[in-house]
Image: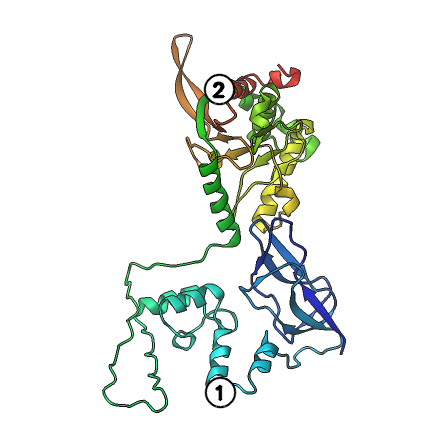
Amino acid sequence: MAIVEVKVPQLSESVAEATMLTWKKKAGEAVTADEILIEIETDKVVLEVPAPASGVLAEIVQGDGATVAADQLIARIDTEGKAGAAAPAAAAAPAAAAAPAAAPAAAASASKADVAMPAAAKLLADNGLSVGAVTGTGKDGRVTKGDVLGAVAAGVKPAAAPSVIPTGAPTKSLPQVAAPAAPNLGDRPEQRVPMSRLRARVAERLLQSQSTNAILTTFNEVNMAPVMEMRKKFQDAFTKEHGVKIGFMSFFVKAAVHALKKYPVLNASVDGNDIVYHGYFDIGIAVGSPRGLVVPILRNADQMSFADIEKKIAEFGQKAKDGKLGIEEMTGGTFSISNGGTFGSMLSTPIINPPQSAILGVHATKDRAVVENGQVVVRPINYLAMSYDHRIIDGREAVLGLVAMKEALEDPSRLLFDI
């Protein structure tokens, strides 16, 4: 038997631990080299763990939902084994060493615990239910969250715990306490799901931003007609040349960089009692993903063309959807842009992404009545909102910075001449 160990990959310096998601293979099944065995979620990204060699997954040391650290052993592969061979249960060895023999009831309980998904196990515990009381409809009979919610709604009650009487104690008149019944929610179901590491980290950073920054937001409106006309005029030629369409985001990025060059404090950050002015422009693009908000970075955005920006944003969007963004792609950033208009937002006050000092919020472009030269006309208007850290950015720089973005968008030729 030749055993190869499967370990947690190296995590970033700021990440101490991670959570195991769902194993894609069972103990005893054949695996091939580089086949993805499991995904591990940190508070920043989801990492894939490939098989280091071909063979049979001989043992799963850390199961679904376990908390692990970098370089920790999580499984073993037998490179000479045959699929279907009996394999030891996850983490069975330490338990066997601690106790010579396990009671049949305990063994059955452990077996049952293995067929409940992590979120389902939490719901079972919250409602005082055992795995055996719920019929599993998941893969291989696993109990899912939906199974538990259905059981609770159907009025399945927890089994009463057996009375335990100390040796030598009298058996008369022991008070009987009925186990609390599981709440019957009827047509008002609730679902309790633990936060993912990524969601918990997002929550932590947003609270940190609000508690440490003196956040103020300034607003302005932009006539997007010039940008829309330019896109319409060059869209076909641009798509043919670069293989990607011109979107609004490349204009917003270019306009933001244009303003940051004029007012460098908008691109700065606070470090203790110091203001750090960055001589580069790394623009974070807020992207929604199935696991939560992520902010990948456009490195040296001032040196990127419109096509480069559009291609990179499309790449970020796909990676976020697939959970493939790397830690290095979301580290750093000197200024961020959040596009709530993608979802139809009219106006919002974005929260600064620390340690940055400002963030631009853009919204849905809608036809609105505006006054031009004393006449009411209809124009495609977008409301811009820029939140900034008032500790280092005064209202003057913030307002003028947003005006510079507005002017660049209403006259895109300014971006060519940097005026």
| Residue 306 position in % (x across, y down) | 65, 28
Q: Is residue 320 visible?
A: yes
The secondary structure type at the circle numbered 2 is helix
Residue pictured at 49% horizontal, 87% vertical: 103
| Residue 217 position in % (x across, y down) | 44, 27
- The amino acid type found where label 2 is placed reads Val
The secondary structure type at the circle numbered 1 is helix
Q: Is residue 251 visible?
A: no
Spatial separation of the CA atoms under disc 1 and disc 2: 72 Å
Residue pictured at 55% horizontal, 66% vertical: 64
Please name the residue that numbered disc 1 is placed on: 104
User: In the image shown, does 343 or 270 lie closer to the viewer?
Assistant: 270
Q: Which mark is residue 350?
A: none
Q: Is residue 70 above or below residue 373?
A: below
| Figure quadrant of the N terminus | bottom right
Please name the residue that numbered disc 2 is placed on: 399
Residue pictured at 45% horizontal, 37% vertical: 210
User: In the image shown, does 371 or 157 lie closer to the viewer?
Assistant: 157
Q: Is residue 337 above or below residue 411?
A: below
